[in-house]
Image: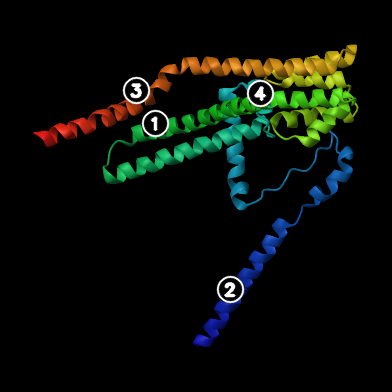
Amino acid sequence: MSPAVWGGVVGLGTTAGLALVAARVVAIRRPRLDARVLPYVRDLVTADRPAAPTEPRNALTAVFGPLVRQAADGVERVVGGNPSVERRLSRAGLEVGVHEFRVQQVLWGLAGFGFAAAYGLLRTWVRPANPVPLLLLSVAAFVVGVLLRDNRLSAQVTQREAAILAEFPTIAELLALAVAAGEGPVAALARVVRRSGGELSRDLADVLARIRTGEPVADAFDRLAATTGVSVVARFANGIAVAVERGTPLADVLHAQATDVREAGRRALIEQASRKEIFMMIPVVFLVLPVTILFAFWPGFIGLSLTY
């Protein structure tokens, strides 16, 4: 065939490929039928007739997704501790289930296994050796990746609870001011949630949502006290529940709790500074003091050198 015919065939193939890619992109970006319909008929989906499973987003998920889920089930059977994981996921504010977390652990383990296997292949290619230690190293890297994801979850819990503890005095003072201004507990809570942002505000927004769906105020705050991992927030929720049930002055309770938290934070900061006093002296002894001595004696040394 002539070059013109070959050019036409190549151009036709390129055009058809681009059209297929564009059609697939449009189909992927289009909302699925269940996403458009289920918000209006969600009450009709019962336990006897569960909703249809979601389709995989890409070919990689469709091919390797079942294998990863089976590996996640294996990790769940070996590691265990599902109640602890569920509690930590709730305390970290992550909207994932235990099984999804196990899948993340498997992915972290596979990442570690991949790095160790790549190192083993390069090491074997440069200097051939017994592959058994490298295989054991890859398996150990998989286990380390799984454990690192669990450790990361604990770190996320710690970070979120530290943020809640830092936000608590301000939130408590705002609630106390709103209650002292004459608003009820629910109205004051709605005002504070609307005007604030942060981890504690998210928890209070969940409490407000449960109250608006018909749950009693005391029960909603009791649930917050039972699920939170911060003792200060638990006492705060219990205090509000008791104040609502018995009619005690809520503003005084909130002011007292905010003051107690600020004093506790100040004491913790002083204790931390006293524990790290030696580390605080390191820059003074090894940086500031030598520079001061150098500036004090260097001119005299230069003068003595010039004299001789």
Left or right, residue 256 beside residue 186: left
Location of residue 42 in the rendering, given as x and y in whole percent from the top left corner? 86, 40
Residue 165: numbered disc: 4
Q: Earlier in the sequence, mark 1 or mark 3?
A: 1
Residue 285: numbered disc: 3
Q: Are marks 3 and 4 in contact (CB under 8 Å)?
A: no
Please state which amino acid type lies under the numbered disc 2.
Thr
Residue farthest toward the left in the current orientation of the protein:
308
CA distance separating discs 3 and 4: 35 Å
Q: Earlier in the sequence, mark 2 or mark 4?
A: 2
Please state which amino acid type lies under the numbered disc 3.
Val
Instruction: For residue 26, say whether it is visible.
Output: yes
Left or right, residue 3 beside residue 68: left
Give the foreground label among 1 and 3.
Answer: 3
Location of residue 97 in the rendering, given as x and y in whole percent from the top left corner? 68, 32
Residue 84: numbered disc: none
The residue pinned by badge 1 equals: 136
The residue pinned by badge 2 equals: 14
**Residue 252 placement: quadrant:** top right
Residue at horizontal 76 percent and vertical 23 percent from the top: 172
CA distance separating discs 4 and 1: 43 Å
Looking at the rendering, in which quadrant would you find the C terminus?
A: top left
